[in-house]
Amino acid sequence: AAVNVVAGAILFFGKVMILLSTLIVCYLIATSMADSLSLQDGPPFLSLVIIAIMTWYVASSFMNTYAAAVDTIFLSFLHDQEVNDGSTAKPYYMADSLRASIGVKNADNKVTPE
């Protein structure tokens, strides 16, 4: 449950940061182009709203791909913990940092996955 809460918060803040950085860049471009295009009302804010909506959906698709990768790694970690026992016949294939987080070791640290 904690992994989902932390990952959800990271994904949300990632989307917000992507959205804000894109809007800042587009606003700066729009204000510099407003003078050269002789726009009377300044930068076109409707365009910025449309860009914000499109940016949110693009950022969501990228961050959802990241979330799927995190979920896959977590499920692989759980499967490795369930199937293997750290012996020479059935070593853990998880990363050393994940192995250290649950406090287990392989019987022979020189075992590599085939």
Image (cartoon, grey):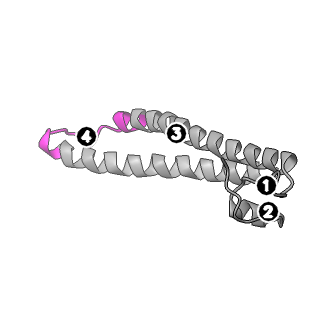
Residue 34, given in percent of the width and then of the height, sits at 20, 43
Q: Give the mark toward the camera: 4 or 2.
A: 2
Q: State how many labels appear.
A: 4
Three-letter code for the amino acid on which mark 2 is drawn: Asn
Region of the chain picked out in magenta, as a range? 35-49
When the figure is inspected, residue 14 is found, relative to residue 59, above or below; the finding is below
| Residue 46 belongs to magenta span | yes
Dot placed on the residue nearer the N-terminal end, 4 or 2: 4
- Residue lying at 28% horizontally and 42% vertically, measured from the top left: 43
Dot placed on the residue nearer the N-terminal end, 1 or 2: 1
Dot placed on the residue nearer the N-terminal end, 3 or 2: 3
C-alpha gap between disc 1 and disc 2? 6 Å
Please tell me the numbered disc located at residue 62: 3
Please tell me the numbered disc located at residue 106: 2
C-alpha gap between disc 4 and disc 3? 35 Å
In the rendered structure, are the residues bearing label 1 and label 2 in contact, judged by CB atoms less than 8 Å apart? yes
Q: Dot 1, crowdedness within 10 Å: few (<14), some or many (≥20)?
A: many
Three-letter code for the amino acid on which mark 1 is drawn: Pro
Please tell me the numbered disc located at residue 41: 4
Please tell me the numbered disc located at residue 91: 1
Residue 81, given in percent of the width and then of the height, sits at 83, 51
When the figure is inspected, residue 2 is found, relative to residue 19, above or below; the finding is below
**Residue 72 in the figure: left or right of residue 102:** left
